[in-house]
Amino acid sequence: MADLALPLSGRRLLRPGQATTILAGTILAAAVLGGLLAPWIWPLDQSAVDLGRTRLAPSLEHWGGTDDLGRDVLHRSVYGLRVSLLVGAVAALVATVIGGAVGGIAGVAGGWVDRVLMRIIDTVSALPHLLLGIFIVAMLRPSLYAVVLSVGLTHWLSTARIVRSELLSLRSRPFVDAAIAGGASRWRVLRRHLLPHVAPKIALATTLMVPHAVWHETALSFLGLGLPPHLASLGNMINDGQRSLLTGAWWASIVPGLLIIVVTLALAAVVARWRDRLDPRVRAELEL
Amino acid sequence: MVRRRVLVAVPVLIATSMGMFLLGAASPIDPAKQYAGAAAFTMSQENLAQLRANWGVDDPLPVQYTRWIGNLLRGDLGWSTSRHESVTAVIGARAGWTLLVIGLALGVVLVGSLLLGTIAAYRRGGWFDRALRAAAYAVESMPVFWLGLAAIAIFALGLGWLPAGGLTDVRADGTSPADVARHLVLPVTVLAISQAPWFLLFVRDSVADSLLDDHVLAARARGLPGRVVLFGHALRTGLLPFLTLIGTHLPELVGGSVLVETVFSLPGLGGVTVQAALGGDFPLLAAITLITTVVVLTANLLADLAYAAADPRVALDG
Amino acid sequence: MRRFRLRLAAAVAIALLAVSACSDPSASEGGRTDGTLVVATSGEPDNLNPILGYGSDGGTLLFDGLVARDASNKLIPALANALPTVSPDGKTVTATLRDGVTFSDGTPLTADDVVFTYRSVLDPKIDSTIRSDLDMLATVEAQDFSTVVFTLKYAYAPFLQRLALGIVPAKAFAGQDVNKAPFNRTPIGTGAYTVDSWTAGDRLVLTANPKYWGGAPANDRVIIAFVEDDNVRAQRARAGEFDAAELAPKLAASFANVDGYRVEKVASADYRGVMLPFGDPVTGDVAIRRALNQAVDRAAMVQGVLGGSGEPAFSPVPPSSEFVDPTAVGKDTADATAATAALEGAGWKAGSDGIRARGGQKAEFTLMYPAADSLRKELALAVTADAKKVGIKVNPEGLTWDAIEPRMKSDALIMGWGTPFDPDFVSYQLFHSRFAGQGFFNPGFYKSPATDKALQDGRDHADTAARKAAYSAFQKQLAADVPWIFLTYLQHTYVVRDSIQGVSPRVEAHDHGTNAIWWNIRTWKAA
C-alpha cells in the first residue's frame, strides 16, 4: 500500500457506487471520530498490563482477544489507529506547509525560479523516501516527533506541485489582473484572491497524504524505529504480534492489520468520489 | 537534456548529503559508544574517551564534513561502527542480493501485470476484471510487512512448503542457485504482489483505452484475431507510459525491499539499513542512502531516455 | 457496494487462511547432522579478536585462555599447565604454559604470545573494549619461553578469573594495526575449531581442529547462524534448520509439543531490576524505594513475562553463587499491605486521583527502558502496574541507549547485569560510590560507606570465609538501602534437537555470547 495516490490513476478505475461511498464514508467517519473521542468513550491506560489474562482468544468479552501481556487487542488497535491518524494529520500539515511554501514561491515568482524549483521537485520525488525517512529517524532517535518530521520532510512534493500549478493558472485570470491593476498589494492578492481558490486543492492533497503518513508510521514502528514500543501503535502491534503468530495467538497481528486495511480502503473510496469532482488538471498534478 | 538533468541532480545530491551530515552531527549518538557495543556498559570513561580520540569525532564540523565527502569521492566510504567492517565491504557483500530481489520482483510485476492487465482490459467489466481490481485494491491497502508475515504464517509455518527466511540453507556450502531460488520465492512474490496494483491497474486502464483507439478499432474491423489486436496493437500503444511508471516507482520498490528483507531476514542492504539505523551507524546509513539515491536517480533518467527513444514525439525538456 | 464487499472478502479470506495455517504448526524434520552441528544465536560478535574484547570470559571455540571453566564454572588450567600461582601479597601472579600447544597455523605457543595479548589490551592506541577489566594489571612479562609473570597494582582476589581471555599469536600481528587487522575476521587461535568462513549477518562456519591439544572434536563442522530477530529465529527453528537455538522464553515454550526438539532452561546469573536514582525527589526517598520493593509481584513477572523461565531476584549475587546470603531476600509475591503501611508511615498520603503525595510532591517518576528490548519493556510495564496499586505513578518511557544515558542520574531505568564468576565482577562498579555517575556504573549515585567497605573487603581478602562475610554484609546493606529493585533472574532458554547428546549447561552470565549452552559443543554427539 505504498503509494495510495497512484493506484487511483486510472480514469475509470474506481467509480464507487453510492452505497459504497456511504459505507466507506461511515467507516471513515467512525474511524476519525473514534480516534478523536477514544480517550473519553473508551479510555485506555497505555501502560496497563494484566499478567493473569494473557493470550486469550477473541471472545465476547475481548472481541480482538488479548495479547502477550493481557491487553485487549481491539482496544489497543483503536488507539493505534488514533496515533496513526494523528501522526498522519500532523505530518500532512508539515508537508503542506513546506509544499505550500515551495509551490507558492514557484507559482508567484514564475519564470526561471519556477523552472528550477520544479526541476528540484522532480529530482527530490525520485529520492527513495523510506530510506531518507529511516535516516532522519535514526539520527533524531525514534520518537513521535522524529516520525512526524521524517514523513513531513519527504512528502511535500505533490502539495507543492498543486499549489504551484493553481497559482500559475490563476495568475492569468482577469480578476487577478483587475485586483493588481486596482493597486492591491501582492500579499493582499495572494490572501484575498488566490488562497480561497487554492485551499480546497490543498485540502485534498493533505487528505491524500494521511494514508501515506499512516503507512510510514506503521512501517517505521514495525522496524523498531517509530514510537516507543509500549505505546499502542498499529506498527508496534503488528511487530509484537509477529511473536504471537508463533505462539498461536494469531489475533494479535491480524486485528491491527485488518484495521489498517479497512480504513485505508474506506479512505480510498471516499477520495475517489471527491476526485471525480475536481478538474482534470489538478487530478493530473495529484497523480490521481 | 541529460546535462540539464545532471545539473539539477548534483546540487540536490550535495544538499542531501549536507542535510544528512548536519542531522548526523546534531544527533545525540556517540560513535565511540556505538563502536564499543555492549562492552560500553563495562568500560571506564577514560577508556571511552580514548576510543573517541582514536575516531576523531571531536573535530569541528566543517573539518569532519570535508573529510567525509572527500573520502566518499575517493571511494573510501568509511568504517561501519555497527558492523565493524569497512562500509565498502558491507555494501559490496549485500548490494547484489538487494538488486537481485528488486530486479526479480520488478520482472515478475512487469510480466504479471502486462499479462493480467491486458486480459482484464480485454474482458472489461467481466468477472476477471472485477476480481482483479478488487484484489488490487485489497493488496494495495495491506502493509507489505503484514503481507510478508501472512505469507510466512501460511506457506512456511503452516504448509511448510517454503523456508521462512534467510538466503540459503544453513548447512549449504556456498550459494547454489537452486537453494537461493527456493529461499527467494516468498520474498520476491510478496514484494511483487505489494507493488503490483499500480502496474496492473495502469496496464488494464491504458490497454482498455487504446482498445477504443481508431487504429485498434480499424485492426479489429479488418478481422484480425483478438489476440493479435490485443497484444500487437492495443498493448503496444498503452505500453509507452509504462516506462516512466517504472522510473517513478523505483523509490517505492526500494522502500518495499527494505521491509521485505527485514521480514524474511535476507542478507541484503535493507536488513543492514535497519540495523544501522537502530545502532545509529552514520557512515553506513549515510552511504547506503546516498548510493541508493544516486542509483535511483540514474535509473529514472534511463527510464526517461528509453521513453524518449521509444517515442520521438516526447520532448524531454518539459 | 458489490465491489467493496469483494475487497473485504479478499482481506478476510487472507486473514482466515493465516488463522487456519497458524493453528496447525508443522512438525520439524528429522535430525541428521552429517558431522555438522548448526546452532543459532542472536548476538553476532563484532570481531573475533580477544584483544578487542571477543570472548573476554572465555568459552570461545576458537581460542583458549590460560585458564578455562568446567561444567560447574570452576577454574581449570587450559593453556597454563596448572592454575597460575598467586604470591602471598596477592600482587604477583605466575603462569607456566602447557607444553606442545600450537596455534592452528602450526606456530608453537610461547610466553611472548601471552605477553603480547595482555599488553595489547592495555595499549591505549588499540580500541579494546575490555581494558577497564584489567585495571589492576601493572605489567606482564615473559620470564622465559614458557613462564609469564603478571604484576598487579593492587591485590585483586578474583584476578585468575580474568585469565580466561583467549591468547592470540603475536606473529600474526607483526606490522599491523590491531584495530583493523584481517585477523579480526579470520583469526588464528589454539582452540578446538578454526574459522572456515564468516558471512556477516548470516553465519560463521567453523572447522574442527584435529590437532587440538584437548583432543580432536567429535564434530567436523560447527555452523553458528546469526539470526538477530527472535521471531525469525523461532520460525527457522520451527522449520527444523537448527540443532540448537537460543530463544526467548515464551517462544521456547511454544516448542514444548514440537516433535524432535526439547527445551533446555539454563540457570543464569543474569538479573533484571529497576535502578532508582538518588537524585530524584521521589525515587531518592528510601520509603518509596522500600515500598516499591515490596509492591512488585516477582512471581507474576516470572510467570507472565518470562513464561516461567526464571526466578525472583533480591540481590546481585545469584542463587547459584556460594556467596549468596539467603537471609537478604524478601517475598516472591507482592505485599501491598506492607508497602502501603510503609508509605503511609513516611507521610505519603493518597490524593483524590489515587496517587500519593507528600508536601506537594507527587509520588510519580519516569521509568526508562531500552526500546529494542521487549523483555525489559514488559518488565517496565509490570512494575508500572504494580506501583499503581500502591498509589505510585510510574511513567514508562522506551528510549535508545544514547537517549537513556544522560538521564540516568534522575530517571529510573530497567537494567540488567550479572555474572556467575565472582561477586566482585560488575557489582563493585555498580554499587561502589567511587564509580558514582561513571556512565553505566552506579548511574544513580548510590553512596553508602557500609557498602563501599563490604565491596572493598571482598576484593582485598583472598580468604573465602572473609569474602563470604563481606558479601553477606553487602547484600544486607543493599536490601536496606534499595538502590535497585531486583526483579528476576532469567533462565536462558534454548531448544535443542532431541537426538543431541552431551549437552552440559552451566550457569550463564548476562552476556552469554561465547558461554552459551554450546560451550562444550566439541563433545556433542548426534545419536
Image (cartoon, rainbow, N blue to C red):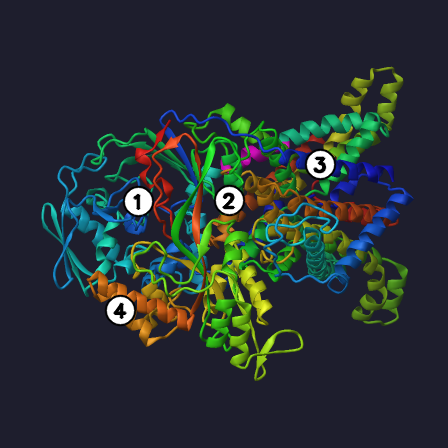
The chain containing the residue under callout 1 comes to: C
- Is residue A74 depicted above or below C457 in this figure? above
Q: How far separated are the C-alphas under marks 3 and 4?
A: 63 Å
Where is residue C48, by image quadrant?
A: top left
Q: How far separated are the C-alphas under marks 2 and 1?
A: 23 Å
Q: Nearer the viewer, residue C83 or A99?
A: C83
Q: Is B104 in the magenta?
A: yes
Q: Earlier in the sequence, mark 3 or mark 4?
A: 3
The image position of residue A255, as x and y in percent, is: 70, 46
Q: Earlier in the sequence, mark 2 or mark 3?
A: 3
Q: Are marks 3 and 1 in contact (CB under 8 Å)?
A: no
Question: From which residue to which does the magenta span run?
Answer: B95-106
Please rate how many residues cluster around mark 2, counting C-alpha atoms within 10 Å: few if below 14, some from 14 to 19, many from 20: some
Q: Are marks 2 and 4 in contact (CB under 8 Å)?
A: no
* Residue at image point 85% right, 24% down: B215
Q: Are marks 2 and 3 in contact (CB under 8 Å)?
A: no
Q: Are marks 3 and 4 in contact (CB under 8 Å)?
A: no
Mark 1, residue position = C59
Three-letter code for the amino acid on which mark 3 is drawn: Leu
Element under label 4? helix
Mark 4, residue position = C456
The image position of residue B175, as x and y in percent, is: 45, 28
* Residue at image point 31% right, 43% down: C60
Mark 2, residue position = C229
* Residue at image point 55% right, 40% down: B261
Q: How far separated are the C-alphas under marks 3 and 1?
A: 47 Å
